[in-house]
Amino acid sequence: MLNRIFLLGLAALSFCIPAIPVNPHLPVSIPLDLEIRGETLSQVAPQMWNDHITYWLKWTYFAGVFFKLGWLIIRLLYIRNKIKKPAHNAAFSFFKYKVIDRNAANFEMIDYHEDVHIRQWHSLDILFFEIVAIVAWFNPVVYFYQRSIKRTHEFLADRETVRHFGNYYQYASLILNRSLQYSPEMTNAFSDKHLLKQRIAMLGRNNASKANLAKYVFLIPVLLCLTSFSALYKNPAATAEMGQKGSVAPAFPGGLHAFLGYLSKEVSQSDIFKAHHDQGKVLVSFVVDTDGNVVSPQIMDSPNANLNSEAIRIIRNSPRWSPGLQDGQLVRVRYEIKLGYQLSSTN
């Protein structure tokens, strides 16, 4: 039972750790002089991720998600069909539904075994890990979780059944005799040839000693430490300069040329910038945080206070960037940009 709790808890915790709120503060300076006319860029690190690769990786992931979701629906429909039209000598359960051939040998033992699965909500665990497998289909660890939780379910049901009937040898023979019977995937099947040897071996084992149970107690501080380390990695307390080895600057969707195009369009369409086009440019700083959001826009230098709020608006409305990296860790990166409007010779 502790193994079951451990598997479910650790899987849930793996999704919770990335959601732990941390406030990384990493002062990073990238001198960047960006103008609407005669743009100049300096000290911008090369981008790690090619936009096309990122695009295809994203669609590959979602294709896998849709495939896994469709496969889950197909299997659920198959289970429903087998519940309505059970096969000869069937023996399985799924949530509250129990399908057992009443003419099967040792029907009472099989029936009690499936009752244990239903009472302990083992199908809910299976469905939970199916959902995890949809979200993280690319992670091979997920499939080890699925295999382990199903094995744990059978050990629990076998133990309760043997305790109830008190006949170890008869029950072991029943498992052996039904080892070739097939049941739908995702169900709590009485027979599973892949678990045959382990199930029979577990029937003869005693309960775990208190010394063995202590490992679960020691596991709690270990998990807390790992959680803390995860937060520390998300909040590295070090300074970095873009352009150094191992540093990657944030990326605007479509690259820096797309960012120039975005600024050019916004400034060119701004009546405020047009009205004050001859007074110079506004120096604005902003931060691209670890989620790629543009935050903390500030006016560093301005020839006219009327331009300040408009420059802040343009920067704040920027689409989300790809976050910057320093030695493989997400970091906050500060930019300084000059925004100005320059009329063309024909206007």
Image (cartoon, rainbow, N blue to C red):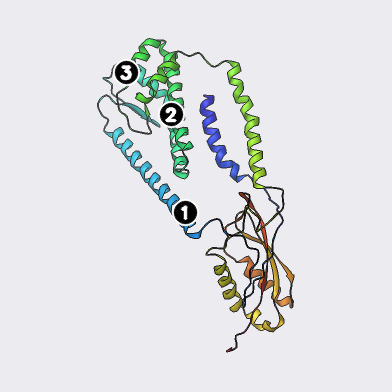
Q: Disc 2 or 3, which lies upstream in sequence?
A: 3
Residue pointed to by mark 3: 107
What amino acid type is highlighted by mark number 3?
Phe
Judged left or right of residue 8, residue 191 is: left
Could you say whether the residue bearing mark 2 is in a helix, strand or loop? helix
What amino acid type is highlighted by mark number 1?
Lys
Name the residue located 46 percent from the left edge and 29 percent from the top edge. 148
Judged left or right of residue 152, residue 15 is: right
Image label count:
3
How far, Cα to Cα, is label 1 from label 2? 31 Å
Name the residue located 65 percent from the left edge and 43 percent from the top edge. 231
Q: Disc 1 or 3, which lies upstream in sequence?
A: 1
Above or below, comparing residue 183 to residue 42 in the picture: above
Residue pointed to by mark 1: 58
Q: Nearer the viewer, residue 164 or 276?
A: 276
Judged left or right of residue 188, residue 344 is: right
What amino acid type is highlighted by mark number 2?
Lys
Q: Nearer the viewer, residue 302 or 275?
A: 302
Residue pointed to by mark 2: 150
Which residue is the extreme one toward the front? 245
Q: Disc 1 or 2, which lies upstream in sequence?
A: 1
Q: Nearer the viewer, mark 2 or mark 3?
A: 2
Q: Does any portion of residue 150 appear in the rendered image?
A: yes
Above or below, comparing residue 31 to residue 269 in the picture: above
- Quarter of the picture holding the C terminus: bottom right
Check disc 2: other Cα within 10 Å, few if <14, some if 14-19, many if 20+.
many
Could you say whether the residue bearing mark 3 is in a helix, strand or loop? helix
Judged left or right of residue 280, residue 271 is: left
Q: Quadrant of residue 281?
A: bottom right
Name the residue located 47 percent from the left edge and 53 percent from the top edge. 58
Could you say whether the residue bearing mark 1 is in a helix, strand or loop? helix
